[in-house]
Amino acid sequence: MLLCACTAGAAQAWTPYHAHFSGGPTAPAHYVHLQLDMPSEFHEAQRQQLRDHYEICSSGKEAAALIGEPVEPYLPLPAGGLPERPWVQDIEIYYGAGRGVVVHTFTHHYIDLKKSRRRPQHKGDCGLLKSTTRTVLIRDAAQSCKIPLPAAGSRLEVRCGAGTGEAEYLYRAGLPDEALGVVKPTGETGSAAGRRCRVFGTQEDLQFCVDELNELGGAPMPLLSPYNRTHAGLLLRQNIGNLRYVAQRVVLDIQVGEGLFRVPENGAAESALPPLPADHR
């Protein structure tokens, strides 16, 4: 029995994470917004997987009729078609003076294959579901913290470890190439968001492109973050395995609320951090 699946709502414009920390004391930072940037073949493969899972689910429902059992109702695929990008990832990096923040927001679509008592939204009706998660990484000289944003009404689980020493953190921005560890420069340059960057690493394993801000005569802050802890600069591109991230926007010398860099207490209410975007595109 096929039910009606009626959904509405247009994708909202991206709201930077720091917009939720307005008011009160501010601090300077550089801002980079990267997004998962994959070829159309990647997204079509994800859409095909959704079609395959839907076929498995709906066929299982209809097969009940073959043994004389009632067919459980199930939803059709959306009338407007499957999402153009079933996987969406946004990475926001804030480079502050001696500290950095990364906000990773991930949305994926999937077929509701099975009922779950623990997860009421899972009804086993073959419907198209969407899950959005967010993890915040905060790093400074004293500590490095990882904070997954939990479900509404839950408590924060803040996990922190020792940070790099302040002297090392502040000095590393001036290290020569031979002291940068195993990931070496390729001698090539790239670009993203209208800025040039220097390429490090190999395409097969890990490769990234860093804007060292040389045209500014040396950045006023050590440009390290939890995502580029050894190569100072603005991270504009990063390839990890077959996933490719590219900067969409770069803003230098913005003022952000001090609360952005503040680590919430472990066990605090989930409302201590900004809410998930209502419609992550």
Image (cartoon, rainbow, N blue to C red):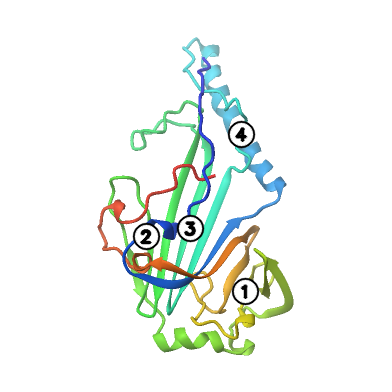
Query: Which is in the foreground here, disc 3 or disc 2?
Result: 2
Disc with the residue nearer the chain's start (1 vs 2): 2
Judged from the image, the secondary structure of the residue bearing numbered disc 2 is loop
Dot 2, how many residues are within 10 Å of its Cα: few (below 14), some (14-19), or many (20+)? some
In the picture, the disc for residue 22 is 2
Q: Is residue 188 left or right of residue 83?
A: right
- Residue 58, percent across and down? 56, 23
Tell me the amino acid under the disc marked 2: Ser
| Residue at the (48%, 58%) spot, across then down | 104
* Marks 1,3: beta carbons within 8 A: no
In the picture, the disc for residue 104 is 3
Q: Quadrant of residue 203?
A: bottom right
Q: CA distance from mark 3 to mark 2?
A: 20 Å
* Marks 4,2: beta carbons within 8 A: no
- Tell which of 192 and 133 is nearer to you: 192
- Residue 202, percent across and down? 69, 71
